[in-house]
Image (tube, grey):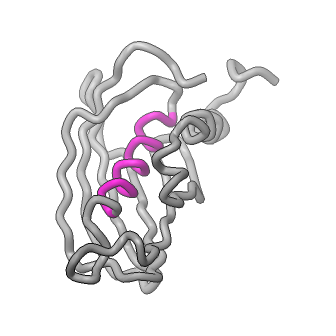
Amino acid sequence: MTDRHLTGDELARACVAAMYARDVASQTIGITVTEVREGFARLNLTIKPDMLNGHGICHGGYIFTLADTAFACACNSRNEANLAQKCTIEYKRPGKAGDNLTATAEHQSQDGRYGHYQVQVTNQENKLIALFEGQSCRVRGELL
């Protein structure tokens, strides 16, 4: 079966696998992809001691990176190349060393080339750590 025969969630998983294979930054910090469907992605990251800031809590950049990577997986799940055009994050509570964070990204709407996605980052107790919103812009090209 060639990539051109893939559809729906099967295509989404293949697109994300191809993109993640080239995503050295996410791999290096330990982000893992746990679930992918068309317009949806769930990723995990365990907070290690070397990810803590001067306050002894998870540096916000790691939380943003997890949410942004989930956003990227969701918005590229249809084999149409998308880039982030605008992203915002609201931190609700700190992440701590040893926390297992889960970022769940979901497609909300589409207006031509522009997609809107929401990402919730929670910890292992399902407590909300951050809310992320991203706007994607479809560009030329495919992932597969």
The answer to whether residue 8 is left or right of residue 133 is: right
Q: Quadrant of the N terminus?
A: top right
Percent position of residue 10, x then y: 67, 38
Q: Is residue 70 magenta?
A: yes
Q: Position of residue 12 (x, y in %)?
A: 58, 38
**Residue 132, percent from left and from top:** 25, 56
Would you place residue 26 above or below residue 51 in this image? above
Residue 135 picture quarter:
top left
Q: Main secondary structure of the magenta part?
A: helix
Closer to the camera in the image, 21 or 53:
53
Give me the residue at 35% from left, 18% from top.
Answer: 139
| Residues in magenta, as a range | 63-77
Is 69 colored magenta in this rendering? yes
Q: Which of these two is toward me, 47 or 35?
A: 47
Q: As displayed, is residue 137 above or below residue 92? A: above
What residue is drawn where x is 44% and y is 73%?
A: 47
Left or right position of 85 against 22: left
Q: Quadrant of the C terminus?
A: top right
Instruction: Estimate the x, y position of residue 8 in percent, counting from the top left.
Output: 60, 35
Query: Does 143 sit left or right of 108 as displayed?
Result: right
Up-down relation of residue 115 to residue 99 (above or below): above
Q: Residue at x 64, y 30 (%)?
A: 7
